[in-house]
Image (cartoon, rainbow, N blue to C red):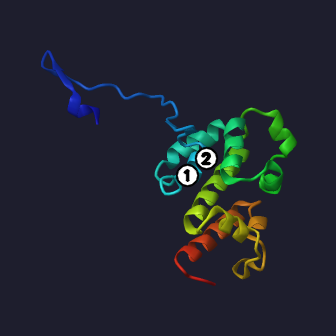
Amino acid sequence: MGRSTADKENGKVKIPKAKTTRKPVKTGSIVKYSPSWVVHHSKDAPGPNLQLIGRIRRGVKKAEWKQLLGTIGSTEKELESILPSSISSMQKKEIYSKETSERIYALARLYGFGYEVFDSKEDFKTWLLTPSRALGNKQPFDLLDSNLGFQMVENEIMRIQFNVYS
């Protein structure tokens, strides 16, 4: 990208150095690549996976977690059963562990995908709490306490998206 604007000095082509550190880019009041950004940009989320992995490794900040709760319209208490940390321990920390951060991003991606497939946030939330025959008559939400459960729920949403019912 920077090569097209390179200047010639003393017969040599100077190529600008790439920046090695990037500050998060804000989208309105939502920081790019934050969990809330992922909800709103679910189609874009697979592209910058390396950015998301870096964010997970650094840990989700408490403020980003609170923002995600507002974005998806849930409370900590509602999501407590699917998080690897207790709410009381999360309230004591400013930055969450890699494991907790990964689950927060998984939630953000799932909700973004669900909002994309269902007609409304309310329809998606209702679906999450309704037993599904394809998921062994379990509520999809009850499976979100494991990575395999997340995968099963995402697969079911994908089937709904393409009208392939089990």
Q: What is the secondary structure assignment of the residue under circle 2?
A: helix
Which residue, as the protein is rendered here, is positioned at the far left? 11
Residue beneath label 1, please? 40
Q: Residue at x 72, y 34 (%)?
A: 95
Q: Residue at x 66, y 39 (%)?
A: 64
Residue 123 x, y percent position in the rendering:
66, 68
Which residue, as the protein is rendered here, is positioned at the far bottom? 166
Residue 67 x, y percent position in the rendering:
67, 42
Q: Amino acid at mark 2?
A: Ser
Which residue, as the protein is rendered here, is positioned at the far top? 10
Locate residue 123 relative to residue 1 in the image: left or right. Answer: right
Give whichever of 107, 122 is nearer the camera. 122
Q: Residues within 10 Å of mark 1 (few under 14, many from 20)?
A: some
Disc sitting over residue 36 in the figure? 2
Q: Residue at x 64, y 62 (%)?
A: 121
The N terminus appears in which quarter of the rendering? top left
Q: Residue at x 44, y 28 (%)?
A: 20
Q: Name above or below for residue 149 compared with residue 38.
A: below
Q: Amino acid at mark 1?
A: His
Residue 42 x, y percent position in the rendering:
53, 56
Task: Report if the CB atoms under discs 1 and 2 are less than 8 Å apart.
Answer: yes
Query: Does residue 61 appear in this view?
Result: no
Q: Residues within 10 Å of mark 2 (few under 14, many from 20)?
A: many
Query: Does residue 51 appear in this view?
Result: yes
Residue 150 x, y percent position in the rendering:
68, 63
Disc sitting over residue 61 in the figure? none
Locate residue 80 relative to residue 51 in the image: left or right. Answer: right
Q: Name above or below for residue 41 compared with residue 149.
A: above
Q: What is the secondary structure assignment of the residue under circle 1?
A: helix
Residues at marks 1 and 2, CA–CA distance in whole angstroms: 7 Å
